[in-house]
Structure formats: C-alpha cells, structure tokens
Image (cartoon, rainbow, N blue to C red):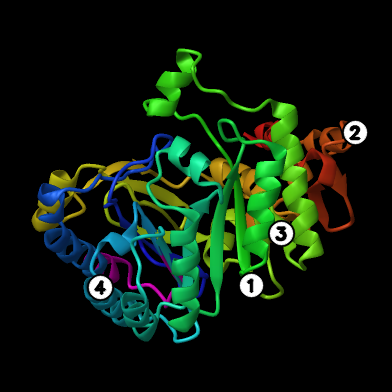
Amino acid sequence: MDAAASLPWGLYVHIPFCPYKCDYCDFVAVGGGRRVALWHGPYVAAVRAEGEYWVGRLRPEPPVSAFYGGGTPTVLPADDLASLHRALAARFRLPPEGEVTIECNPGTVRHAGLAVLRRAGINRLSIGLQAVQDRLLTALGRRHTFAAFREAFTAAREAGFGNLNVDLMYGLPQQSCADFEESVCRVLELRPEHLSVYALQIEEGTPFHLRASHGTLALPSDEVAAEQFDCACRLCAQAGLEHYEISNFAAPDRRCRHNLLYWENADYLGLGIGAHSHWRLQRWANTVRLAAYRDGIAAGAGTWIAEHQPADAARERSETAFLGLRLLEGVDLRAYAARHGQTLDAAFPGIPARLVEQGLCRRTDDRLALRPDAVLVGNLAFSAFV
C-alpha cells in the first residue's frame, strides 16, 4: 500500500453511534444506551490510533476533504468530536481551505456544541431531515420532529455554518406527491447550500424489509416515486440549485467536494468500523464489530481489516465508467483515456454506442452522460460497465 504523491483524496471517519436505529437503516450503526456510551472514549482513541497507523504506513499528501459520517457523529460530545478532528487534521495536514463535513440528526445538536465544532474547523454540516411531516417521520422510526429540524438548522447558521446540506427521502410509506412537494418547498425556503434527495431503499434485515415481505408496508408506486423525483428536480432548478449528481443538488460552487471523490473514483481513506478505503487501485474494508476493531487496533499490523481487494485494472476501468455516469455531466472521455491508457470505447467495445442508441445516454466529443429522462433508470446504463 505504498503512497503515490499528489493525487487528490479524502478522509472518511465513521462514527457508528446513534441514539436509536431507524426502521429502514442497514448502515453500520449502534443504537444508544449506557452500555454503548461506554464505548465512546475507547472508540475515539482507536480511530486516532488508526489514523496514526495509516499516516506512518502511507505517508500521504494532505487530503482535500474530511467527512464524519455515521451513525450519528453528533451523539458524541462536541468537545470529543472537536478534539478528534483537530488531532486528525493536524496529523494528516488537512489544509485550512479543506472541506470538512459532519453528519447530524435533529435533536443531537445545540448552538453551543455546533459552535465548538465550527471553531475546530468543521465547516460543512449535513442534517438528516427526510420529511417535514411528523407522521411520516414517525412511520420511518425517526424520533425527531420538523420543529426540531428547524431549531437545528437555525442553530447551525447562528454557530457560523455557511455550508449546509439537508437530506430528504422520497418513495416513503404513505407519502403522497403533495407531501414530498411540501417537504422540498419548506426546506428550500431556508435556502440551504445543498440538498440531497434519496429514494427509500428496502434493505434486507431491516424492520422495513420484514414488513415489506409480509405485505404490510404501503409504498407508493414507481410512477408516484418518479413524479416525486421530478418534483425535486423542478423545484431545485427554480431555486437556483444545480442538479449535478443523480441524488444531489447544489448552489453555485457548493458541490460536495468529498462525495465528488467517490463519483470520480478517486482515492479515499476510511477510519473506524465498517469504513471502506480506495487507495492506489487497492480496496479494503474494516471490521464492523466494535470489539474486533478495538482489539485489532491494539494489536496493530492492520488486523482490523476484514476484507482486502488487490489492485485490479479492469475493475478500475469499470468503476470509473459507471461511477462517473452518476454525475449529470457524465464521464470525461479524455480524462478517462489519460487515466486508464485506453479510451472508453476500447475498454468497452460497442457499449457506449449501444447506450446512446437505447436512449439511455447522450454523447458529445468529450462526454458520455445519462440523458435527463433516463436518470431514474441509470442502473441500466451502469450495469453495462460491470
């Protein structure tokens, strides 16, 4: 895992703790309680130690971004989060202008704690709202209200956050098109710099999956979900937000720099349980078990890594293609050829032309991109490169 200098990369830090798990969630997350809280201190110490390990092993150039995801990172005390970020930022030499995002849920942040995070150098906040109707939040298993979200949003502004993202979901049980339109409109009234709009996914092993298998989960039809998505596109365009990735909309110059690294198939280093890394063509993933992670960090030598994939040029060519198609501007064909030593057409003979003929993609001299009316069926194009 030798480092190659100068390539842009991002640091991801997974904080798995949550006050509770939502009924649709299959993320690596640990619900609240006193026993779980006992893990907070040891876990933060282990993450710092993992950071030290990789700095010594990879000797990386400074990252362009850092992202604290979860879970709900703000379940940890603000002082602990701030201390962790300062330590990692110093060790990895994160530049002052680097984008630093932290995810939070309403009810887990207050003005004082947000001010602590902002002073520590965290400059972007992503707030998980999902819907403005309290009845829909309850149906999702979320325990906050829209009023709590508004308090969190206001507190973030007052604490000095000038770059805010809000997460919304469509295709929810019992969610009408009018419900979703209201959600988008009421969020846009607050003028966030970024809006993420995700379709509900029914993941195996979740309470929603069990209900769906029993036929007791009243989901909207695909046609209604598509209408909801189209509504988001229309309203965001009217509000001046650019639709730059399938699920993401941003004000000018406010695209999420960290997430762009994923869609550009760039390098990233993940710390914490369940965190994934992509480094110089290799991929690896950490264990999802708290005790195994703690013990592995103590033992050293990367024993907390649960899965490792060696460098694979064919995999990289594939992933650069289908991840790039998630961006509305599509795959930069010249950059693709320079990166992989062959054109997209040479790497996948006949496939780009077929996607154009099928009406899934459009092509210019230097770009292959999804057609706007094919965004919701993008998987048909992505799968052609797998």
* Quarter of the rendering occupied by the C terminus: top right
User: Disc 1 marks which residue?
Assistant: 254
Residues at badges 4 and 2 in contact (C-beta under 8 Å)? no
Residue at 40% of width from left, 44% of height from top?
A: 142
Residue 59 in the magenta stretch? The answer is yes
Amino acid type of the residue that numbered disc 4 sits on in the rendered structure = Leu
- Where residue 84 appears, x then y in whole percent? 25, 73
Residues at badges 1 and 2 in contact (C-beta under 8 Å)? no
Provide the secondary structure element on which disc 2 rests. helix
User: Disc 3 marks which residue?
Assistant: 244
Q: Residues under labels 4 and 2: Cα distance?
A: 51 Å
Counting residues from the N terminus, which is met first, the one under dot 1 or under dot 2?
Answer: 1
Q: Nearer the viewer, mark 4 or mark 2?
A: 4
User: Disc 2 marks which residue?
Assistant: 357
Crowding near pointer 4: few (<14 within 10 Å), some, many (20+)? some
Counting residues from the N terminus, which is met first, the one under dot 4 or under dot 2?
Answer: 4
Residue 48 sits above or below residue 319 on the image: below
Residues at badges 4 and 1 in contact (C-beta under 8 Å)? no
Residue 248 sits above or below residue 82 on the image: above
Tell me the magenta residue range: 53-67
Provide the secondary structure element on which disc 1 rests. loop
Farthest-out residue, top: 214
